[in-house]
Image (spheres, helix red, strand yellow):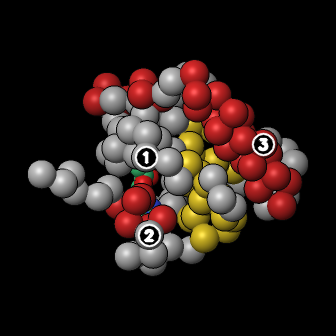
Amino acid sequence: MTAEKTIFKKIIDREIPATIVYEDDRCLAFEDINPVAPTHVVVIPKKEIVSVDDLSEEDEALVGHLFVVMRKIAAELHLESGYRVVTNCGRDAGQEVMHLHFHLLGGRGFRWPPG
Ligand code: AMP
């Protein structure tokens, strides 16, 4: 039995549209369809990993790459006054899409602790 593709895998495979802001051989970044901040970009690895909880040592360089890409996107989008990077992992965190992703949020102030 073949597992159903996630929405994000369908975006990687260009089966559904997205507003892509960055792409390279290892990752993709696109605008969130339901933004919670003036800037809300979703950054994902092309490798199918469910969440942080599914990372292994072989993914260390990939995750580091995603963070460097987020720093570059933040600079390009002029988020000089600050931004937040969030990843939801599992049910208690409210993860909806079972493909590892980082929310890059900016353009407004954020509270701490998060809800
Ligand atoms: P999470 O709750 O961390 O799993 O976040 C999933 C995110 O994916 C949410 O912010 C959704 O708005 C976003 N999302 C779902 N479908 C799409 C889509 N087709 N294009 C862009 N973002 C999406």
Q: CA distance from mark 1 to mark 2?
A: 12 Å
Label 3 or label 2, whichever comes before in sequence order:
2
Please give the name of the residue rendered at 60% of the width and 70% of the height, measured from the top-left corner.
20
Q: Nearer the viewer, residue 30 or 49?
A: 49
Percent x, y for residue 13? Answer: 44, 69
Q: Which residue is mark 3?
A: 68
Give the label on residue 48, or none. 1
**SS at mark 3?**
helix
Q: Which numbered marker is on residue 13?
A: 2
Q: From the viewer's perspective, is the residue at label 3 or at label 2 nearer?
A: 2
Where does ligand 1 appear, by image quarter?
bottom left
Q: Position of residue 95 (x, y in %)?
A: 36, 38
Upstream in sequence: badge 1 or badge 2 = 2
Percent position of residue 70, x then y: 72, 47
Q: Mark 1 is on which residue type? A: Glu
Q: Residues within 10 Å of mark 2 (few under 14, many from 20)?
A: few
Badge 1: how crowded within 10 Å, few (<14), some, or many (20+)? some
Q: CA distance from mark 3 to mark 2?
A: 23 Å
Give x and y (percent) for residue 3: 21, 51
- What kind of residue is marked 3? Val
